[in-house]
């Protein structure tokens, strides 16, 4: 995936989440994102890093 900016809807589809869940995770700073004019945006590279971190957490916790 190239370093592109994704919308909340695109991130929800990519992660197989509802938009509501993706919004909640972003608002709780559990998902890496930023707001532009009140709308959530996400860098694809940040999401890839976040996914790897989540996989590492699962591996550590067994």
Image (cartoon, rainbow, N blue to C red):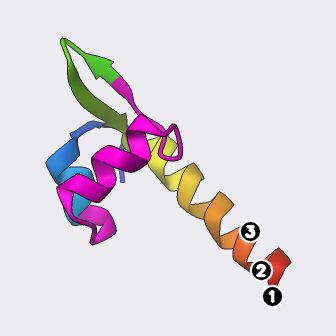
Q: What residue is at 22 percent from the left and 44 percent from the top?
A: 8
Circle 2/circle 3 CB separation < 8 Å: yes
Which stretch appears magenta? 14-34
Would residue 8 appear left or right of 26 to someone viewing this image?
left
Residue 34 image point, x, y percent: 38, 25
In the image as oriented, which residue stretches furthest toward the top? 37
Q: Which numbered disc flags the more N-terminal residue, 1 or 3?
A: 3
Neighbour tally class for label 2: few under 14, some 14-19, many 20 plus, Cα within 10 Å: few
In the depicted structure, whether residue 20 falls above or below residue 39:
below
Relative depth, front residue between 21 and 48: 21
Residue 48 image point, x, y percent: 50, 54
Neighbour tally class for label 1: few under 14, some 14-19, many 20 plus, Cα within 10 Å: few
Label 3: which residue? 57
State how far apart marks 1 and 3 are (Cα): 8 Å
Label 1: which residue? 62
Q: What residue is at 27 percent from the left and 53 percent from the top?
A: 11
In the image as oriented, which residue stretches furthest toward the right? 60
Q: How many marks overall?
A: 3
State how far apart marks 2 and 3 are (Cα): 5 Å
Query: The N terminus appears in which quarter of the rendering?
Result: bottom left
Q: Which label sits on residue 59?
A: 2
């Amino acid at each position: 995936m190239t370093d592109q900016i994704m919308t909340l809807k695109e991130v929800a589809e990519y992660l197989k989440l509802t938009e509501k869940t993706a919004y909640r995770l972003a608002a709780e700073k559990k998902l890496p994102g930023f707001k532009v004019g009140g709308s959530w945006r996400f860098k694809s590279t940040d999401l890839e890093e976040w996914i790897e971190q989540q996989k590492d957490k699962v591996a550590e916790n067994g």
